[in-house]
């Protein structure tokens, strides 16, 4: 149960009890759509852009829908009112002075003074009304103005010609046809405002992208440096303290932490080297003293004890020192598997290896070789057949070591990685083991940024899977 659920559920129950006494129903819990989360960016740069761009886009939409719609409606109504008023004046003149039979004078006045092209047609029925467009401010406003000011049967066409508007009005014994310019009755230059609005938005978005990129890049470099430090890589040459004050503080804290850890590792390595030298000196003195003893059963037992102490010492020091001091280099898996195959033949164990992808990988060669060797030798010790599969897809390297041995119970698999733990009942470890093989293998894998996991094998025994970034 997540923290939100722990807080939400009791609150929800409390609201349910309270809601039983209320005259209205409480709203149901709202879940964030899963399909939207799939398309949402996961990086800080993409999310920052969305945080900046989304309000800007919403503002543009609101301004366009609310303000521009009202602006268009107001300006179009005023222009349409003026055009209809001119048409009403022309009708008044035609009805007041019927002696002008050819209407040439009123036609000239309308064309030169009112910018209207008119003609008086013989009395005939008006055309059938055309379907109105879904969204046309001019059609509705112009029709309303003609109805209010002229109050005669009419027919208009606002879509036939993009530059002109045709209006026909039924007179007593004729039909007045008027062609008016669309920009005289409709606010047609508002697209300039939209162009300016969109243009300035693009400029602001471009500036935001440039500034965000400069602010996000130090965070990305810090993440790369931290990831490389976890994998044992040196500090990137282009890494330096820069960016916002918070990012600078985080970078300085990371550099100081890295220096402290490196000093501690160096001190521990020096201490272990000194301890190793002293203990090896003592063991060498034991060997020299045993060489002067006469050949006997007691001497052989003491030599075996010294050999076991030497082997245990090497194992302890290897686990304590790790492979942190080794540099990254190229390792050919095919050569590693060839040596393991030769070793398996000497032990009489069936061995098969398969490599998918490029066998060359960038790792700590000695450490990774020891990792694979520990897993495979451990499998050979308890099984008759071992199968190794490596898959290198460019980003990840996965190595699976499977055997047909007794395996490890699921509840004991994580316990097997602890240092000095010996699962005698599960693996029948011989007396020479120190319980550090899997611990060293996991330590090496994690130093590469990966891990080692145990599971059941298709062969019937144990499967050890190593997965590291490559």
Image (spheres, rainbow, N blue to C red):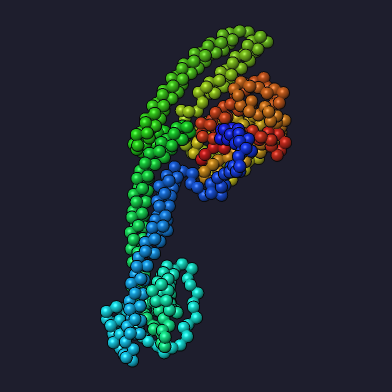
Residue 469 in percent (x, y) is at: 52, 39
Query: Exactly how many numbered labels are in the figure?
Result: 0
- Residue 165 in which image quadrant: bottom left
- Say which of 80 and 179 sits in front: 80
Q: Residue at point 70% right, 22% down?
A: 424
- Residue 347 in which image quadrant: top right
Compared to 296, does 144 lie above or below? below
Q: Residue at point 69% right, 30% down?
A: 410
- Say which of 136 and 144 sits in front: 144
Q: Is residue 244 visible?
A: yes
Residue 407 in percent (x, y) is at: 70, 31
Q: Is residue 355 visible?
A: no
Is 242 on the left or on the right of 396, as rendered?
left
Compared to 363, does 95 lie above or below? below
- Say which of 177 and 133 sits in front: 177
Compared to 10, does 115 lie above or below? below
- Say which of 24 and 391 sits in front: 24
Residue 179 in percent (x, y) is at: 36, 80
Residue 349 in percent (x, y) is at: 69, 34
Tell me the quarter of the image containing the N terminus: top right
- Residue 295 in which image quadrant: top right
| Outermost residue toward the front in this view | 96
Q: Residue at point 49% right, 13% down?
A: 278
Is 209 on the left or on the right of 439, as rendered?
left
Q: Residue at point 52% right, 43% down?
A: 395
């Amino acid at each position: 149960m997540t923290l939100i659920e722990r807080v939400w559920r009791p609150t929800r129950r409390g609201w349910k009890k309270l809601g039983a006494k209320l005259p209205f129903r409480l709203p149901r819990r709202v879940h964030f759509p899963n399909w939207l989360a799939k398309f949402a960016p996961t990086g800080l740069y993409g999310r920052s852009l969305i945080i900046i761009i989304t309000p800007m886009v919403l503002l543009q939409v609101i301004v366009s829908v609310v303000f521009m719609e009202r602006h268009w409606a107001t300006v179009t109504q005023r222009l349409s009112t003026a055009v209809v008023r001119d048409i009403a004046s022309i009708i008044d003149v035609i009805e007041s002075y019927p002696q002008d039979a050819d209407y040439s004078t009123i036609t000239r006045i309308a064309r030169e003074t009112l910018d209207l092209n008119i003609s008086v047609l013989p009395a005939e029925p008006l055309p059938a009304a055309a379907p109105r467009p879904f969204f046309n401010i001019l059609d509705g406003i112009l029709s309303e103005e003609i109805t209010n000011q002229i109050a005669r049967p009419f027919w208009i066409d606002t879509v036939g010609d993009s530059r002109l508007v045709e209006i026909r009005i039924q007179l007593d014994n004729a039909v007045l046809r008027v062609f008016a310019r669309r920009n005289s009755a409709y606010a047609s230059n508002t697209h300039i405002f939209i162009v300016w609005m969109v243009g300035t938005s693009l400029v602001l978005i471009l500036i935001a992208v440039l500034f965000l990129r400069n602010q996000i890049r130090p965070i990305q470099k810090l993440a790369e440096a931290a990831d490389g430090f976890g994998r044992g890589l040196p500090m990137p040459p282009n890494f330096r303290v820069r960016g916002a004050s918070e990012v600078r503080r985080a970078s300085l804290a990371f550099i100081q932490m890295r220096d402290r850890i490196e000093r501690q590792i160096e001190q521990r390595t020096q201490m272990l080297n000194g301890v190793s030298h002293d203990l090896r000196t003592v063991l060498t003195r034991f060997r020299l003293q045993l060489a002067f003893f006469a050949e006997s059963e007691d001497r052989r037992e003491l030599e075996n004890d010294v050999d076991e102490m030497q082997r245990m010492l090497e194992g302890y020091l290897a686990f304590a020192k790790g492979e942190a001091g080794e540099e990254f280099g190229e390792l050919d898996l095919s050569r590693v598997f060839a040596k393991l195959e030769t070793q398996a033949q000497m032990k009489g164990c069936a061995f098969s290896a398969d490599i998918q992808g490029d066998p060359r990988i960038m790792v700590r060669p000695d450490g990774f070789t020891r990792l694979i060797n520990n897993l495979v030798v451990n499998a050979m010790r308890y099984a008759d057949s071992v199968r190794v599969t490596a898959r290198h897809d460019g980003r990840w390297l996965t190595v699976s070591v499977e055997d047909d041995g007794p395996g490890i119970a699921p509840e004991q698999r994580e316990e097997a990685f602890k240092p000095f733990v010996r699962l005698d009942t599960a693996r029948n470890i011989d007396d020479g083991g120190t319980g550090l093989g899997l611990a060293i293998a996991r330590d090496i894998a994690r130093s590469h940024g990966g891990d080692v996991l145990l599971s059941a094998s298709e062969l019937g025994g144990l499967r050890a899977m190593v997965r590291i970034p490559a």
